[in-house]
Amino acid sequence: METLRDIVIVIHLIGFAILFGSWVVEAVARRYQATRLMDLGVLVAGVAGLALAAPWGLDGGELNYVKIGIKLVVLIVIGGLIGASTGRAKKGRPLPSWVFWLIGGLTLFNAALAVIW
Ligand code: HEM
């Protein structure tokens, strides 16, 4: 069970890598808009994160539910911003670039929260 939990953590990290990696690609290209790949990253990180939020395969450790709750709220906000950005871009009305920077900032905030708290 512990190995299985470790594998789900790796999947969670792959979701984070897809989300943040695709965000960096857009930032470097100076497009400042959300993409479908970011949707995929949110989905993978979110599903794996929810699986990790259940207390299984912990080897005696405990879960910090306040931290997990904050991460879930932040992920929902990130998903909403990405959805708003891709939805409006399709209609030819892109969101202001601060929304793009907020998506990257909140993603890093969640990663920092996971590791530092
Ligand atoms: C953009 C969103 C997210 C990012 C960038 C992120 C990042 C990370 C990282 C880097 C780790 C590894 C930390 C370590 O092992 O020291 C981790 C672990 C974990 N994450 Fe996330 N996460 C996100 C969303 C979520 C969500 C939505 C949930 C649950 C609802 C969640 C629950 C967990 C749990 C339970 C762990 C296992 C380690 C722990 O208890 O801290 N994560 N996350």
Image (cartoon, helix red, strand yellow):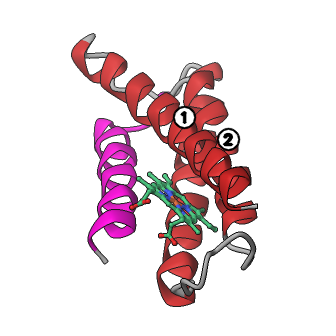
Instruction: Tell me if mark 2 has few (under 14), some (14-19) or many (20+) residues whose alpha carbon lies within 10 angstroms of its own.
Output: many
Q: Circle 1 sits on which residue?
A: 14
Instruction: Confirm or deny contact between disc 1 and disc 2 (CB under 8 A).
Output: yes
Examine the structure image and report whether residue 113 is included in the region drawn in magenta. yes
Question: Was residue 66 drawn as part of the magenta stretch in this picture?
Answer: no
Residue 103: x and y, percent?
Answer: 40, 46
Q: Is residue 98 above or below residue 111?
A: above
Magenta stretch in the rendered image: 94-116
Q: In the image, is residue 49 above or below residue 89?
A: below
Does the rendering let one see residue 45?
no
For the stretch drawn in magenta, what is the main secondary structure? helix
Q: Residue at x 49, y 66 (%)?
A: 74
Q: Residue at x 31, y 52 (%)?
A: 108
Q: Is residue 8 visible?
A: yes
Left or right: where 115 falls relative to 62: left
> Measured from the top left, where is residue 16 in percent x and y?
48, 41
State the residue position of label 2. 44
